[in-house]
Image (cartoon, rainbow, N blue to C red):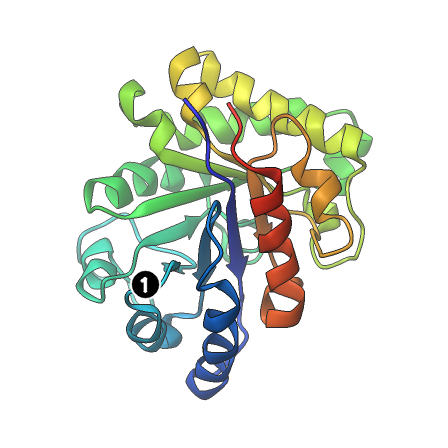
C-alpha cells in the first residue's frame, strides 16, 4: 500500500482571477508531463470557477480554503459542500491555522466538516499544528492529539485513510522558519501514530504533509523524511518558478509505504 507524494499550494488571500489565470497558464506546461506526484491549488473562493475551468483535463486539482459543515442555512459569508461540488471543485483545506487563529475555527466544527466534505465527494486536507508557545511549553503532542482525534472523531474508521493531514507548526508559517528535519519527522510520525491508534491499516493509507515554509531549497530534505508524504505550500506556491521545483522534488522522492 503506497502513498503517492502530494504537493498542495495554498494561495491564502492572494491573486485576482486575472492573476490566477496568468499563474495557471505559466504552471500547466511545466507540470503537464510530470507524473508521480499529485498536485493541488487551494485558491480564494472567487478564483475557484476560473481555476477549475482552466485546469480541466490537467493533473492539477483545485481546492477551496474552507467549507461550512451545514448543507445550507443562515451562515452569512460561508459556502457549503454542494456549492463547491457544483463547480467541480476537487476538495477543501479545513482547519488551517489562520482559520483557527483569526476566525475562531474550532475542533468541534472540524469534526463535522470533515465527514460532510467526504460525504459530498470532496477530498480533505485537515490541518493541525502547535503554536510557538505550545512547543516551548512541551505541549506539542497534547495539542496534536486533541486536534487529530477530535477532527477525525465522527469519521468512520474505514474512511480515515481518505483524509490527508497537514502538520503545520504555526511558528513556521510565513516566518521563514522551518522545523528541523528531526522536529518535523517527530511530529509527522506522531500524527500517523494517532491515526494508527484507531487503525494501523488506515494509518498506512493516510498521507501526512509538512506545512511550515517548505520551499525549493529545503523540499528534498523534508520530503525524504520517512513520514513526510508531501507539503502544504504557502508563499512558494504563488510563483510557478518556486512551486515547480517542489513538485519535482516530490516526484524524485517517489511513493512511500
138 relative position to 40: left or right: right
Q: Which residue is drawn at 68% across and 30% down?
A: 225
- Please provide percent x and percent y for residue 195: 46, 20
Q: Which residue lies furthest to the front in this view?
A: 33
The answer to which quarter of the image holds residue 210 is: top right
Q: Residue at x 33, y 45 (%)?
A: 123
In this picture, is 160 found above or below 132?
above
Q: Which of 212 and 2 is in front in this view?
A: 2
Per the image, the residue denoted by label 1 is: 78
In this picture, is 231 found above or below 227?
below
In this picture, is 171 found above or below 204?
below
- The quadrant of the rendering that contains the N terminus is top left
User: Mark 1 falls on what kind of element?
Assistant: loop
177 relative position to 203: left or right: right
Residue 239 seen by the camera: no
Q: Nearer the viewer, residue 133 or 129?
A: 129
- Please provide percent x and percent y for residue 19: 50, 84
Q: Which residue is drawn at 56% across and 25% down?
A: 191
- Please provide percent x and percent y for residue 23: 51, 78
Residue 180 seen by the camera: yes
Query: How many labels were placed on the picture?
Result: 1
The answer to which quarter of the image holds residue 50 is: bottom left
- Please provide percent x and percent y for residue 216: 72, 57
Q: Which residue is drawn at 39% across and 14% down?
A: 201
- Mark 1 neighbour class, 10 Å CA radius: few under 14, some 14 to 19, many 20 or more: few
Q: Which of 123 and 148 is in front in this view?
A: 123
253 relative position to 96: left or right: right
Amino acid at each position: 500500500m503506497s502513498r503517492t507524494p502530494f504537493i498542495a499550494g495554498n494561495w491564502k488571500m492572494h491573486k485576482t482571477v486575472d492573476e490566477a489565470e496568468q499563474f495557471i497558464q505559466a504552471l500547466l506546461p511545466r507540470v503537464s508531463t510530470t507524473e508521480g506526484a499529485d498536485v493541488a491549488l487551494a485558491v480564494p473562493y472567487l478564483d475557484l470557477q476560473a481555476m477549475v475551468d482552466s485546469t480541466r483535463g490537467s493533473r492539477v486539482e483545485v481546492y477551496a480554503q474552507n467549507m461550512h459543515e451545514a448543507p445550507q442555512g443562515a451562515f452569512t459569508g460561508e459556502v457549503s459542500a454542494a456549492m463547491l461540488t457544483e463547480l467541480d471543485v476537487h476538495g477543501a483545506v479545513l482547519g488551517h491555522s489562520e482559520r483557527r487563529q483569526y476566525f475562531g475555527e474550532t475542533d468541534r466544527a472540524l469534526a463535522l466538516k470533515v465527514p460532510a466534505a467526504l460525504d459530498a465527494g470532496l477530498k480533505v486536507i485537515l490541518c493541525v499544528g502547535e503554536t510557538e508557545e505550545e512547543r516551548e511549553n512541551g505541549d506539542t503532542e497534547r495539542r496534536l492529539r486533541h486536534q487529530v482525534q477530535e477532527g477525525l472523531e465522527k469519521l468512520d474508521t474505514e474512511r480515515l485513510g481518505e483524509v490527508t493531514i497537514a502538520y503545520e507548526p504555526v511558528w513556521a508559517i510565513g516566518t521563514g522558519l522551518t522545523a528541523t528535519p528531526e522536529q518535523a519527522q517527530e511530529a509527522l510520525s506522531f500524527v500517523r501514530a494517532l491515526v494508527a491508534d484507531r487503525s494501523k491499516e488506515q494509518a498506512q493509507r493516510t498521507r501526512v504533509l509538512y506545512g511550515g515554509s517548505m520551499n525549493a531549497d529545503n523540499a528534498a530534505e523534508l520530503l525524504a523524511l520517512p513520514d513526510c508524504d508531501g507539503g502544504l505550500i504557502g508563499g512558494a506556491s504563488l510563483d510557478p518558478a518556486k512551486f515547480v521545483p517542489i513538485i519535482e522534488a516530490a516526484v524524485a522522492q517517489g511513493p512511500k509505504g
